[in-house]
């Protein structure tokens, strides 16, 4: 499946969340990642994120798509991140 993940977390947890997400997805820009991921890896990612974030202060939103077939990406301005930045 293809996912877009966005997050808004406390300053103390930003680096941990980004580092964790980049093991599974491609960094697109500040607080946004995307990529193909298996259901099993998505479960792992969510489990890891739940152990990092504070449920009372932080937010992680995951948009799931069955396929990339019908998506179109348009970038205005500079392109940040990308597939070449996988850790």
Image (tube, grey):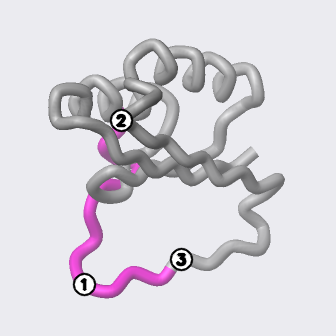
Spatial distance from mark 3 to mark 1, Cα to Cα? 13 Å
Q: Nearer the viewer, residue 84 or 17?
A: 17
Residue with the mark numbered 2: 57
Spatial distance from mark 2 to mark 3, Cα to Cα? 30 Å
Residue with the mark numbered 1: 77
Residue 37 relative to residue 7: left or right = right
Q: Is residue 51 magenta?
A: no
Number of callouts in the render? Answer: 3
**In the figure, 85 relative to 48: above or below?**
below
Residue with the mark numbered 3: 73
Taking the spot 38% from the left edge, 18% from the top edge, the residue there is 52
Taking the spot 51% from the left edge, 20% from the top edge, the residue there is 50
CB under 8 Å between discs 3 and 1: no
Residue 42 position, x and y percent, is 66, 28
Which tag, 2 or 3, sits closer to the chain's start?
A: 2
CB under 8 Å between discs 2 and 3: no
**In the figure, 12 relative to 8: above or below?**
above
* Quadrant assignment for the N terminus: top right
SS at mark 2? loop
Q: Nearer the viewer, residue 54 or 19?
A: 54
**How many residues crowd mark 3 within 10 Å: few (<14), some (14–19), many (20+)?**
few
Spatial distance from mark 2 to mark 1, Cα to Cα? 31 Å
Taking the spot 33% from the left edge, 50% from the top edge, the residue there is 31
Point out the residue furthest to the front here: 56
Residue range highlighted in magenta: 74-87
Taking the spot 56% from the left edge, 23% from the top edge, the residue there is 45
Q: Identify the main secondary structure in magenta.
A: loop
**How many residues crowd mark 2 within 10 Å: few (<14), some (14–19), many (20+)?**
few
């Amino acid at each position: 499946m293809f996912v877009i993940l966005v997050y808004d977390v406390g300053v103390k947890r930003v680096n941990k969340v980004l580092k964790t997400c980049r093991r599974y997805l491609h960094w697109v820009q500040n607080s946004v990642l995307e990529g193909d991921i298996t259901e099993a890896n998505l479960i792992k990612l969510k489990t890891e994120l739940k152990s990092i974030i504070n449920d009372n202060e932080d937010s992680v939103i995951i948009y799931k798509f069955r396929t990339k077939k019908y998506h179109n990406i348009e970038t205005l301005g500079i392109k940040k991140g990308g597939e070449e930045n996988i850790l």
